Image (spheres, helix red, strand yellow):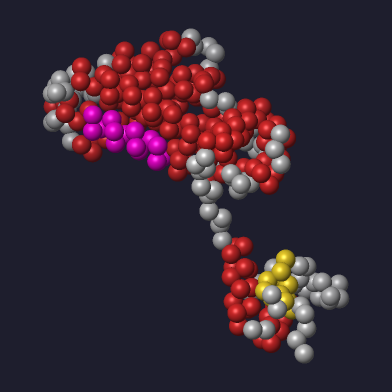
Amino acid sequence: MLRPHRRLYSPDGSECYRLSRTGVQSPCNPHEGFPPSTSTSSCRGLIPYTQHLTGQMVRMATRKVRSRSRRAPLRAAPQQARSLQTRERLLDVAGELLGEVGIESITTNLICARAGMTPPALYRYFKDKYAILEALGRRLMERQNAALFEWLESNLDNMSAPSGDQVEKILQATADVTASEPGAVWTLRALRAVPQLAHIRIESHRLVTDRLTEAFAPMFPQLPRPVLWRRVRISIELGFAIDEMLTEEDRIKRNDLLREAARVMRWSLIDPEDSKATPKRRSR
């Protein structure tokens, strides 16, 4: 006679699930029903105990156990207007809290309390706090890039070579985006400090480098493309650091910092001793 419940253990004995004729039930204590001295490793031998169950039930249970060890995929961005507004609201609140308590102390519970939302509702949009930090980083990078690309499209035809004033305007445009984003400076720090988020910063910077290299290449036809890409990539990283410095360094005036940074970035792109890289006006 088949008992109403059986248990299935993971291969290492660390997880246990109830099973019945209807399939997998909720997780249970691996030691439930056994003496307190029973070790987790001794439970491994109970796996064959499920041999009396149907093959379908065992397959269902096995999939359940294995799925818990896999990394949960990122939540897909919502499509409906109301859901999008809720998601943006959560990101704004998270950004504000990030600036108040820092990367280590921010939690989903704090975000829920500030947003007036229950944790289950938040988890419809983000699986944990690192997913929220990732969304904050992507949103900031996309908005900064959009401002840069918009400026580039409107000024590229009249540009013979990036001047100091033009580089300064690019820095100003991205700095304005950073200033308008809640907790943006801490988001920038998170993109550097949290290993799980480094790919967002790198992917964004490489995208910008590709676009700027494509735009600047006709101005320096004799400069090898890999060399130009390398110089642009370095200047992008400098600009990223300047964005943080604008909010941290109070011993240099904002305009002076932007002007000096633009000068350094311009000469990181154009070597005055490189006679082969004479700038040419971009043809229409």
Could you say which is closer to the camera, residue 284 or residue 37? 284
Q: Magenta segment range?
A: 202-215
Residue 85: horizontal and vertical position, in percent? 56, 33
Specify whether 231 is left or right of 4.
Answer: left
Residue drawn at (52%, 40%), measured in percent from left and top?
80
Residue 257 against residue 103 in the figure, above or below = above
Percent position (x, y) of residue 256?
Answer: 43, 10
Between 157 and 115, the one nearer to me in the picture = 115
Drawn side of residue 236 relative to residue 116, left or right: left
Residue 114 counted in the magenta span = no
- The verdict on residue 210 being magenta is yes
Left or right? Give the position of 77 relative to 166.
right
Is any part of residue 267 visible from this angle? no
Specify whether 181 is left or right of 240: right
Q: Is residue 117 visible?
A: yes
Point 40% across, 41% down: residue:
203
Question: Image quadrant of residue 152?
Answer: top left
Q: Quadrant of residue 18?
A: bottom right
The quadrant the C terminus occupies is top left
Q: Nearer the viewer, residue 266 or 273?
A: 266
The furthest residue to the bottom? 1
Location of the N terminus (image quadrant): bottom right
* Percent of width and height locating residue 47: 68, 80
Residue 252 drawn above or below residue 46? above
Most frequent secondary structure within the magenta stretch: helix
Q: Residue at x 49, y 41 (%)?
A: 79
Closest to the observer: 63 or 221? 63
Residue drawn at x 84%, y 75% is 33
Residue 267 sits above or below residue 51 on the image: above
Q: How many marks?
A: 0
